[in-house]
Image (spheres, rainbow, N blue to C red):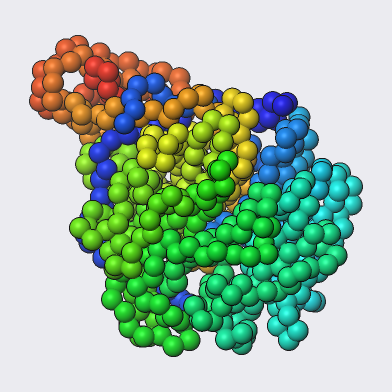
Amino acid sequence: MKSIAIACLLAFTCLTAFSQERVIISKELQDYGVRIDDSYYQSLETYQSKPPYKSTCFFDIGMTYYDLQTMASIQKRIHVFDDGTIGVVWTLGYDYPNFSDDRGSGYNYFDGENWAPFPSERLESDRSGWPEYAPFGENGEIIVSHLAGAEEDGLTLLKRENKGIGDWEEWNFSGPPNYEEIIWPRMATGGVNHSVIHLLAVSAAIWPYQLQDYAILYSRSIDGGVNWNPENYVIPEINSNFYNGFMGDTYDIKAEGDIVGILIGSKWIDLLLLKSTDGGSTWVKKIIWEHPYPMWNYSNMYPTDTFYCVDGAHSLDFDDYGIAHVVFGINRTYCDGAGTFWFPAVGGIGYWNENRPSFSNNLNALNPYGHPDSDLEEDYSLIGWTQDINQNGQLDILDDWGTYYLGFSSMPQIYCNDSYNEIFVVYSSVTETFDNGVQNYRHIWSRRANDPDYWGSFDDLTGHPAHIFDECVFPSLANYSDNTVNYYLTFQRDNEPGMAVRGDEDPYGENFVTFMNTDFYVGIPENQKPVKNLKVSQNVPNPFSKETLVQIDLFDACNVSLEVTNLTGQKILDISKGNLQPGVHNISINAVGINPGLYFYTVNAGEEKITKKMIVE
């Protein structure tokens, strides 16, 4: 495989790895609930020792002002082909705030040596969005998106037999008669040489379809989209006998050969898996989490207790044995009879596979904070959460956050790397110590396991100095790794937490679609030892122009030093304090000779160290 790193603006750095006692957010933040504006939907739019990481590189491959890439689960937006070429899609739009003429699929292609320039216009002939990308045939590619504000209703598909070159063949796909408007699609290709197209979409909720609001419709084609059988089919296991309807972007589809999986779940329905082993002809349903209020629906709201729930963002993959592995975001909700609520500071990443029992319908079954009724077990079925970066025993998060209507830690993606018997998970999480003075940024985090019962350290994939002032969201993970354990993903980044299109409704700005290649060492993901002998305070004052103090607390005597580095990793100051006894000590940093800017200071205490950032005025 040709080196993708050739095309990257290489910024090799060690990823930041974390393994320490988990810190839980305060009860006050856990109980902070906010009413959801549901009108948006109606508007249709125990190992130790060596670090498990090696290096990472980033490359911007596109830009968009339309920054809402999904409302919950992210589509598969990247595919790495066996010859080392890569295709990536996203929702593109430059003409803000209405994007009346130009919204559609942005596309870029890596030919084995270089990425193409940023695309300046969409691929589709009419206004569209929410694309999903997949390989098709022996050497081709296919994209699906939904039409919105266009001349026709339904979906639009693009395909070509040879990836990266030639003209796209485009055609539309509509819903059932009188229900032509279907939206928020998902697509996977399976069978021999990715020749079978599996397609999902939901009926627009202008009026119910087969007694369901936002009914999930499944279609399949074995001849490249010429004929469909079934077409716009409501799978019986999820019809109106079981669910009153669904919400957009709360479902995923995955196909490998004749095995097909559909994962569905949100705040107000079960988390469930539909699995077919005969290419989509028959389905078996497995409830992963049973909802405590079955058949609840938005059309006839009734009050509920507060309960922990799936937040709607999740991901699915199969291992070599055809076993489904699932990750999902966690939140909290309730209904007061007039509206529903979400809890911005609640979050976590749950994990399940087909060899495990289901979660119960107890109100606290998905409580990630150690409740006695919780079914979650840390580092087993609860594998992700917001990290205590400064390791001071509390989460130092500012009072405002970017709004995505998802948990503090959410947007998970999973890939089962059978070549190395490894599970790789990424997610986006609000991250302490990285903020703009008003809101904390989200970073892309990862975690790996060689066995589902043993999860390794947490790695901040966007902890590189280049992303200090970046909001990193909507990761899409390729189902591919090469023989050096390279993992490939894309994400959206900008300099403002939250979005312009929805939620915060921040001012419109440039959002970059960023490709990431994360290169890990081969082997078991091994935890680093927790920092137990050292506590380090934030420097005071900060920012400073003359002198600042850093307070440290030692539990055992050891040699102590402090070093200051700039954004490029260059050491500009080294202070040795020699052997210090247990207790509290102050270390002074003098700004004489240091240019104004952002710096990092690292306190080394024996074999342990803690890094924080500071600003020189």
Q: Is residue 396 left or right of residue 480?
A: left
* Number of numbered discs overlaid on the protein picture: 0
Task: Name the residue at 39% across, 28% down.
Answer: 526
- Residue lying furthest right: 166
Q: Quadrant of residue 278?
A: bottom right
How far across and how far down the image is residue 513, in percent? Answer: 63, 47
How far across and how far down the image is residue 222, in percent? Answer: 80, 59
Front one among 537 and 587: 537
Task: Name the residue at 21% across, 41% down.
Answer: 393
Q: Is residue 230 above or below residue 3?
A: below
Task: Name the residue at 32% across, 83% down.
Answer: 303
Q: Quadrant of residue 233?
A: bottom right
Q: Quick check: can you spot residue 406?
A: yes
Task: Name the residue at 38% across, 37% down.
Answer: 455
Front one among 412 and 4: 412
Quarter of the rendering occupied by the N terminus? top right
Q: Is residue 264 left or right of residue 512?
A: left
How far across and how far down the image is residue 291, in percent? Answer: 38, 70
Q: Quadrant of residue 586?
A: top left
Q: Quick check: can you spot residue 264?
A: no
Front one among 490 and 566: 490
Quarter of the rendering occupied by the C terminus? top left
Q: Is residue 190 above or below residue 53?
A: below
Q: Is residue 29 above or below residue 363?
A: above
How far across and how far down the image is residue 295, in percent? Answer: 44, 80
